[in-house]
Each structure stands twice: as structure tokens, then as C-alpha cells.
Amino acid sequence: MRLDGMGAALNSAATQYELVLARSPQDLDDVFRLRYQVYCLERGFEPPHNGRETDEFDHFSRHALIRHRASGQVIGTVRLVVPALADTAAHMPIEEVTDSAFIRRLPRERSAEISRFALSKRFRAEGGLSDPLLRLFLMRGIVALSGELELTHWCALMEPCLLRLLRTTAIHFQAAGPVVEHHGLRQPSIGLIGDVLDRMEREQPAIWDFVSEGGSLWSDRALRVAA
């Protein structure tokens, strides 16, 4: 898809799909069921158990999902692991596989790890929404949750190919140490949210407008002072 047609494609997709910030027990159950499909059945990263994929980090995470409006089918999900939401001192999943000085220097009270970025292979095989559009719906969820939580920094452990694909839609992260082995090669990455959104706005205003809802989802002025 040409980037100059992305704005129209996103507007069209928004009439068929909705981004949901998972708050209800049913929404969360839908998140865990999709993660089971993707991480246990499709990828084999986690052992199958009870039809849902969960871990100890979900206790202090916030989740978003993409739902097909007509059928109610959940086709994508992502979470933010937020140490500040834990009852006691907590670490992020990325810290179990890398000892990056960049990650250690993040302001813990305003940082989160983007994690469990999952898209339904089955839905895509049935001719659903294209991968670039799905990723942008999930990025919109990440930005919305970050605004609610007043976050200023992201980190993530991503496949190099995913980082390249994100860059094609003006989403740029910085490397935060050497590539590590974790279910394949993964790149520890960080992003200062304001900088990521600023660059997106310069390079692809239509994508920025969708992902940030015209700048309203992440309170730029207040959170830059906090950063």
C-alpha cells in the first residue's frame, strides 16, 4: 500500500474495525484467548494450557485489542507492561533477556514495555485487514494507553523485521543494546514518546493523525515537562 493512500485506507478501516482498550473481564478474556491462538498454537512460543495465554506481567499491564465490528471477532492485541502499576518493585519482561544500560536508565515511573504485539494469522489468511493497517490500529492503542497512564518512554524487544516494517509507516525506535536470542533474534529498543510522535507527524501526517487522534491521545505539552 502506498503511504500517500494510507489516510483514506485508515478512515475506511475504522468503519469496519474498532480499537478497544480492554477494561472488562470479557475484553481481557478475548485478549488472552487471542494470545493463546497466536503464541501457543500459531508460533509455539508458549505451552498450550486452558485456551488462554497469560503470565505474571499481566497483573501490572494494560491491554488493547482490535475487534471486527460486524462479527465481534478479535484480530489483534497488544499490552503495555507498566512497572508503576505493580504493588511492589517490579521488572519488565525485557529485563529478563538483556542487561541494557539504556533500559536501566529509563524513568521507571513513566516507562512501559510494549509487549504481546499479536495479530491473528487466521484472520489475515481469510482476507482481512492488511498487516500495516493492523499495526497502526495497535499503535493507536499503545498511544491511547500511554496518554492515560501519563507515560513518556517505551521499550520493546522486537524482531528486526518488525522494526523495519514499523519504519515504513514512520514509527521509529532506537536500538538499546545488541540483538539477543529470545524465540529468535530480537532487538532491544526504546522510544521517547514525544520524539516518536513528532517524527511521525513530520514524515506521515495522516498516520500521525490516526495514531494519536490529532495529537489528543498523548498530552504532548504536559508530558514533555514530566520527561
Image (tube, grey):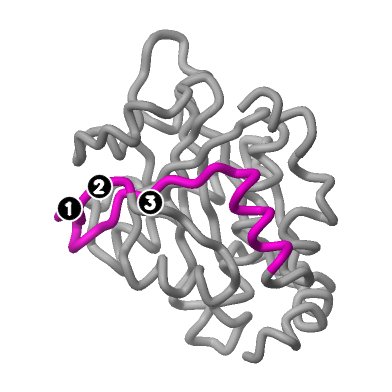
For badge 1, the amino acid type reads: Val
Q: Quadrant of residue 221?
A: top right
Mark 2 closeness class: few <14, some 14–19, many ≥20 residues within 10 Å: some
Mark 2 and mark 3 lie on one chain; the one further toward the N terminus is: 3
Chain part drawn in magenta: 176-202
Q: Nearer the viewer, mark 1 or mark 3?
A: 1
Disc 2 vs disc 1: Cβ atoms closer than 8 Å? yes
Disc 2 vs disc 3: Cβ atoms closer than 8 Å? no
Question: What is the CA distance from the residue labelled 2 to the residue labelled 1?
Answer: 9 Å
According to the picture, the residue beneath numbered tag 1 turns out to be: 180
According to the picture, the residue beneath numbered tag 2 turns out to be: 177
For badge 2, the amino acid type reads: Gly
Question: What is the CA distance from the residue labelled 2 to the residue labelled 3?
Answer: 35 Å
Residue at x 85%, y 56% (from the top left corner):
214
Residue 191, given in percent of the width and then of the height, sits at 49, 46
The single residue placed furthest to the top in the displayed view is 88
Indicate yes or no whether the magenta region holds residue 181: yes
According to the picture, the residue beneath numbered tag 3 turns out to be: 51
